[in-house]
Image: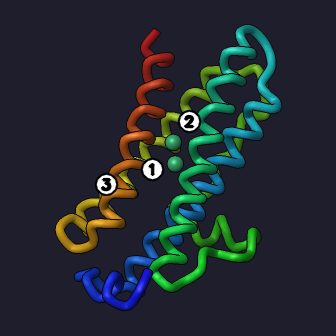
Amino acid sequence: MGKQARAIVDLSLKDLVKDLNKAYCDEWLAFYLYWYMAQTVSGRAYEDMKEMLEKIAKDELEHAGELADLITKLGDVPVANPMELEKGANSSYLMPPRNTADINRIIRIVAEAEAEAIEVYNKIAKKTFGKDHVTYQLVTHILSEEVTHEEMFENLLER
Ligand SMILES: [Fe+2]
Ligand SMILES: [Fe+2]
């Protein structure tokens, strides 16, 4: 992003990048959690669950990439050290269930992680609305995908 592009951001850039980096860390934790559960899920109907987890893991990795791109455009860098991902995230890592066949627990974990993501992006969207159009556009795009993820898993709970 050039000088003028940064100049039109009507917010503290330092603050904004901090928020985006926290969300970036969240996305990596979510990706790893879903990907891990997709590899290890077992028991009845494990194939459907594996497929859903793989699909959303892919979305979360994409979100991490989109955030990294934006942070870079804003003149900063995303968190470089993987050891710092959990410390830098908005919430701590949700451990996958010990019992890999516990589909209900998996569903609850995903629903909780998605609810947290929705809260995070809602906050950034409110903060950037009318102040940083580029960030606003990206976070509302990500937000809409997190809403879909939550719905996919909440529907399974209600069944
Ligand atoms: Fe995400
Ligand atoms: Fe998600």
In the image, is the residue at mark 1 within 8 Å of ligand 2 by its beta carbon?
yes
Residue visible at 80% across and 19% down in the picture? 42
Bin the neighbour count of mark 1 within 10 Å (Cα to Cα): few under 14, some 14-19, many 20 and up.
Answer: many
Q: Earlier in the sequence, mark 1 or mark 3?
A: 1
The amino acid type of the residue labelled 3 equals: Asn
The amino acid type of the residue labelled 2 equals: Val
Q: Earlier in the sequence, mark 2 or mark 1?
A: 2
Relative to residue 2, is residue 102 drawn left or right? Answer: right
Mark linked to residue 110: 2
> Are the two marked residues, 2 and 1, in contact with CB atoms closer than 8 angstroms?
no
Q: Mark 2 or mark 3, which is nearer to you? A: 3
**The quarter of the displayed image where residue 36 is located:** top right
Gap between marks 2 and 1 measured at Cα: 10 Å
Mark linked to residue 117: 1
Where's residue 109, x and y in %?
Answer: 58, 36
Residue visible at 41% across and 27% down in the picture? 151
Instruction: Pick the quarter of the image with the N terminus.
Output: bottom left
Residue visible at 43% across and 14% down in the picture? 158
- Name the element at disc 2: helix
Where's residue 148, x and y in %?
Answer: 42, 32
> How many marks are shown on the rendered structure?
3
Bin the neighbour count of mark 2 within 10 Å (Cα to Cα): few under 14, some 14-19, many 20 and up.
Answer: many
Where's residue 25, x and y in %?
Answer: 59, 64
Return the residue at label 3.
122
Gap between marks 2 and 3 measured at Cα: 18 Å
**The quarter of the displayed image where residue 154 is located:** top left
Q: Is residue 9 above or below residue 50?
A: below
The amino acid type of the residue labelled 1 equals: Ala
- Name the element at disc 3: helix
Where's residue 46, x and y in %?
Answer: 74, 16
